Amino acid sequence: MSDWKIKPARDLGLPTAERLRSHGREAGLVGGLLQGGWRRLVRLYMAVMHRFAVTGREHLPPPPFVIVANHASHLDALAVGAALRGPAARRAHALAAGDTFFTSTPMAAFAAYAINALPVWRRRTRPKDLATLRARLEEDGLVFILFPEGTRSRDGAMAAFQPGLGAFVAGSPVPVVPCWLEGAHAAWPPQRRWPRPGRLHLHIGPPLSFAETPQDRAGWTQVAAQCEAAVRALEPRR
């Protein structure tokens, strides 16, 4: 009989406020139930209010993988997450701006328990934090949802991808799945306080591999450029 070990939770013993912001946060029983209920509500909302459609779901590999997409609305992470099914849906984490979604304990609790977000601090993310996230992605078989532009587009046009994306996948077997979300800017642009009805359509492309890409600044830039090109190629032509 082979030996096996029980690994303690990565967030074991952390105070609640610290746990909510931890890159090692695990859902647990209560968190898992809350997130499951939230996913059902989001899917219903997307179907009723936005007639949400997905093209290319067959391109999604089993976890772990990273999804990258254009970013024009707060609807983006909800829509991408709503497209996932099975283990991928349960293991998905949106990487969210810490200085927006994790500044207060109530907001951090919502981000952690509802949308299962992990914080990325724009001005103070340390190499240690990136290493922890990369390790969790591979070891725990997670799905990361990233928007490499770094902020929402104010006019709907996609900006250049930032190279930080490469820190997660350069030299790694974890694939990157490019997506284009259509309609989110019209439904909920940054200038509006609340969303309005409007059709959303997620276009999913074939996964990209960066296993042979060097894990250095040049490699990160290469990853960002290739992912940006793949996402732009999915934009519907009028």
Image (cartoon, helix red, strand yellow):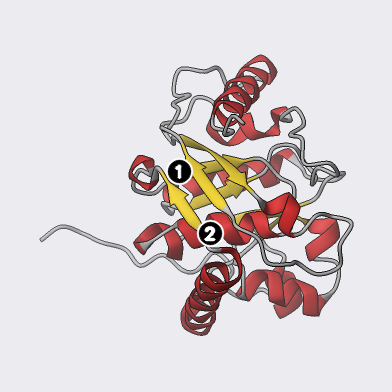
- Is 193 on the left or on the right of 213, as rendered? right
Image mark for residue 218: none
**Of the residues shown, which amino acid type is indicated by label 2?**
Gly
- Is 177 on the left or on the right of 224, as rendered? left
Visible in this render: residue 73? no
**Of the residues shown, which amino acid type is indicated by label 1?**
Phe
206 and 19: which is toward the camera:
206
Foreground: disc 2 or disc 1 = 2
In 3D space, how far apart are the residues under numbered discs 2 and 1 (Cα atoms)?
13 Å
Q: Is residue 143 above or below residue 110?
A: above
**Within 10 Å of the Cα at label 1, are there few (<14), some (14-19), or many (20+) other Cα atoms?**
many
- Which residue is rendered at x = 74% and y = 70% of the image? 18
Residue 177: give x, y in percent of width and height: 48, 37
Tag 1 residue? 65
Q: Quadrant of the N terminus?
A: bottom left
Residue 132: give x, y in percent of width and height: 60, 47
Tag 2 residue? 81
